[in-house]
Amino acid sequence: MKDTYTYQIGDNLYLNLTNRCSNRCTFCVRDERSTYEGYPLWLKGGEPSAETVTAEIGDPTRYREIVFCGFGEPTYRLDALKQIADYVHARGGRTRLNTNGHGSLINGRNIAPELRGRIDGVNISLNAPTAEAYAALCRPQREGAFAAMLEFARALKAEGVCCWFSVVDCIGEAAISQCRAVAAEVGIPLRVREMIE
C-alpha cells in the first residue's frame, strides 16, 4: 500500500510529513488506529521529500488551506516544511501549521522567524494549564517541553505570526478555564475543539 503524504478532509489538504513526535499524548488517535478518516497515515517507506509532497499538492488554490498535520510533529521536518510552504505561497495558497509547540526545542533554535511569511496560522496544542498536568496528559519526551511550548507561542506573536492555543474538550471545564488564563497571559486566543473519537 502506498504511503499517504497528502489527504483531504473537507476543503483542506493535510500534509503527513513524519511520524516522529516529541509527545506521547494519552488521547492521541494514532495510539489506537493505523488510519484517520480512512487514510493510512503510518509511513512505512520513510518520510517524503518536499518535491514529492508539492507534486501531490499541485494547485494549492483548490483548497481553503494546506495544513501541516499528520501522524507526527511537522517541525521535525522544518526544511521540507519551509520549502513546501514557499511553494504553496508562490502559487497563491494559504498554509496552517498544527503543532505541539516544540519546534524550537526540537530544532535547537528559535524557529519563529523562519515561519513568518510562510505559515498563515499556527495552531498550538496547549491541552493543559501547568507543566505537571501537561506531563501527565501529553507525556513529553523532552525536558522543559511545556515552557518551550509557551516560549514558542510568545516568539510567534513577537514575529507577527497569527497563532492560537487549542485544547481538547475532554480535559474538563476547570482545566479549560485555567488554560484560558495561560493563553491570556501569553496574549493569544484559546480555541476549544472536540475530542476525536
Image: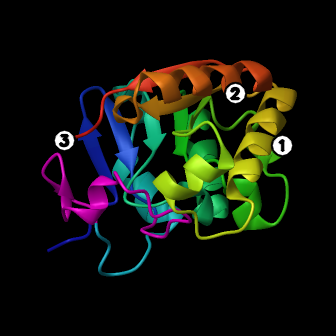
Percent coordinates x, y for residue 18 in the rendering = 45, 66
Residue type at the position of mark 2: Val
Q: Which residue is tagged 3?
A: 197
Q: Which residue lies at the image location 75% right of the left edge and 65% below the top edge?
A: 107
Q: Is residue 108 above or below residue 152?
A: below
Please give the label number shown on residue 113. Answer: 1
Residue type at the position of mark 1: Pro
Q: Quadrant of the C terminus?
A: top left
Q: Quadrant of residue 42?
A: bottom left
Per the image, label 1 sits on a secondary structure element best described as helix
Q: Nearer the viewer, residue 111 or 79?
A: 111
Residue type at the position of mark 3: Glu
Q: CA distance from mark 1 to mark 3?
A: 35 Å
Percent coordinates x, y for residue 43 in the rendering = 32, 73
* Boundaries of the magenta span: 18-41
N-term mark: 1 or 3: 1
Q: Quadrant of the N terminus?
A: bottom left
Q: Which residue lies at the image location 79% right of the left edge and 51% below the top edge?
A: 111
Magenta stretch mostly in which secondary structure? loop
Q: Nearer the viewer, residue 142 or 101?
A: 142
- Left or right: 157 in relation to 140: right
Per the image, label 2 sits on a secondary structure element best described as helix
Please give the label number shown on residue 9. Answer: none
Q: Which residue is tagged 2?
A: 182
Residue 162 seen in render: no
Residues tagged 3 and 2 counted as in contact (Cβ below 8 A)? no
Q: Which residue lies at the image location 56% right of the left edge and 48% below the top edge?
A: 133
